[in-house]
Amino acid sequence: MTTPQGRKGLPVFVGGAVVALGVLLLALWFGGGTPTPSIQGLPSPGVVTSWGLPLVRLVHDICAIVTVGVLALSVISGDSRVAAAAGRWAVLWAFTAAVTAVLTLSDFLGLPVGEALESGVLATFLFDIPQGQAFLIVTVLALSVAVVAVLPLGRWGRVPLLLAAIVGVLPPAYAGHSASAADHNLAVSSLMLHIAAVTVWVGGLVAVVAFGRRLPELPTVVRRFSVLALCCYVAVGVSGAVNAWVRVGDLSLIFTSRYGLLVLGKIVLLGVLGWFGWRHRRATIDALETSRAPFLRLAMGEIVVMLATVGLAVGLSRTAPPLSDITLSTVNTLLGYALEPLNAANLVLQVRPDPILLLGLVGLGVAYLVGVGRVGRVWPLWRTVVWFAGLVVLGYAGAGGLAAYGPAVFSVHAVQYGLLGALAPALLVFGAPLTLYQEVNPAGGERINGSLARLLSQPLVALGLYVVPLLVLYLTPLFDLAQSSLAVRLVLQVVVVFGGSVFFAVAVGEDPIPRPITAVVRTRLLAGGLVANALVSFVLLVGAVRGEGWYAWLELPWAPDRAGDQQLGAMLALGVPALTIIVLMVLLLSKWRTARQRVPATKD
């Protein structure tokens, strides 16, 4: 019975691929991305590269989408058999990434494939040129996913594999038009979110139709995926709008340029996909309890539209956006945005909106409010207030004036990371999100007490997660890379927030953790974090100027004295976390003393 089901869906996928190819060719023709006759005497990559590059890129994107989708389904369903298929798709993904790298080299040099390979610059292209680096990273990650996918991993063991696969689809964003936009940090960030959301959404639905239909618990799996798909839909719409605005810059160009008209085509298809999702939620998901046919028929039509959208997106990537009249300064080119002189007003009012961060914060806020609404008893108002205070601190540190000036001024960077790693996590911990989760989902206690949670709740592990990122950031060359690279900076900030959250969750004890920890151990844990911050600050005070080459490259005319600014930053890097930790130690000792005073009273 499984085989006929698989064969039944095959024509739909083949038809969807054909539609995607047709849309791609139409978009290439309309957007001017089709090969043009070579001019005598000028270098030309040839017909193979000119036509092969977009076609192979389409196949590459489909392989990546299916790989991610199958892994997402394996996590949602908990079925390890599904994950094996991801390994096979990942092999195709790696192969097409390697072919894309070769064709991109040919296009980059303006030479046919054979001559490009014989030129001897392939290694330089892969290791030194952004386009080559991007597809080298993709190839390595895809091969890694292919190898690890066949291992007997549990559901939560496949989560890191899924994240690695999602990361694998992002590097080409740095080599596209977004990387050369006037505000290329915002353009790249929005494109990363857009690609990740599309990949999970489209790939997840393909996986559900191709493999999920064999699962006996399909209704439960579809309901879980429906929530994920709605989140992805919102992320795709918001990030796509932001990216189109940054690249086009003028609303009138949306209607008067070929690039803008292709963007409108994507908007129309997004609206159609929204209708599919609405129909699923209104009818087909509930009908799964009695019949799977309505859901599968509608989902197959949705997949065809999705693949057409993917073809249009590939064609759009080969279409030049409208020319901008903006002249890029050195600062704008290096930082990715224009930066006014530093003063108190700009530090407060300047905004660097990051779609990834802002949508993540909105998601955390909505999830918390939904949990509060579902709790049967009255949830303490002060916990809700503290939770949202933590989100506000994260938002300001990640998308406000600190985020704008942090990459250019060390002292601002120090405050930013103090808020991200200490104050914001401490506030979020007092929001008791795990306790709220248990109140809403009592069965979730098994996950909170799982092996991973037991490992993270070990005091030394929690301390290491808090301390090691700080030591690596300031005692290795990573600081220069983090200041100059948006991707490295985003990853590092996520690591700092995660490490701080685990550290303060274990040290404060507002949420249930798998292992009991005494107040004395908690106090020592906080003291260890304080000592680590003091050590980092001391090294910054007496050591050489960090990021000196990067700061010199920026050539900011209003820049502060770098040595003096680092000394100020060293004190701020200690001050913000130290104040947070000292307040927590006082609260912890006060709670401990109150608890000890109650013991004799109870015995009497």
Image: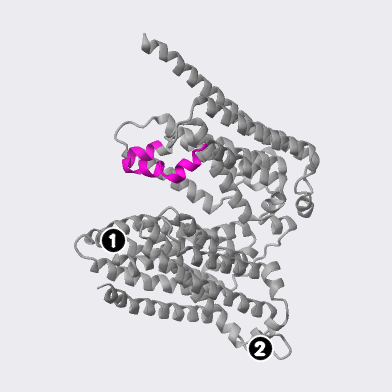
Q: Residue at x 69, y 33 (%)?
A: 534
Q: Could you tell me which quadrant the C terminus lies in?
A: top left
Towards the viewer: 333 or 255: 333
Q: Position of residue 351 (x, y in %)?
A: 60, 47
Task: Decide which of 78, 347 is in the foreground and name it.
Answer: 78
- Residue at the limit of the structure toward the bottom, as seen here: 40
Q: Is residue 516 above or below residue 473?
A: above
Residue at label 1?
218
Mark 2 lies on a secondary structure that is: loop
Question: Taking 132 as reference, is 299 left or right?
Answer: left
In the image, residue 166 above or below residue 454: below
Name the quarter where the N terminus is drawn. bottom left
Could you say which quadrant of the image residue 533 lies in?
A: top right
Q: Amino acid at mark 1?
A: Leu
Question: In x, y percent, where is residue 151?
Answer: 45, 62
Let me know if residue 440 is in the magenta part.
yes
- The magenta stretch is 435-458
Looking at the image, what colour scheme do you see? Answer: one colour
Q: Which element carries disc 1, helix, strand or loop?
A: helix
> On the picture, is 463 further left or further right than 445?
right
Q: Is residue 362 left or right of residue 550?
A: left
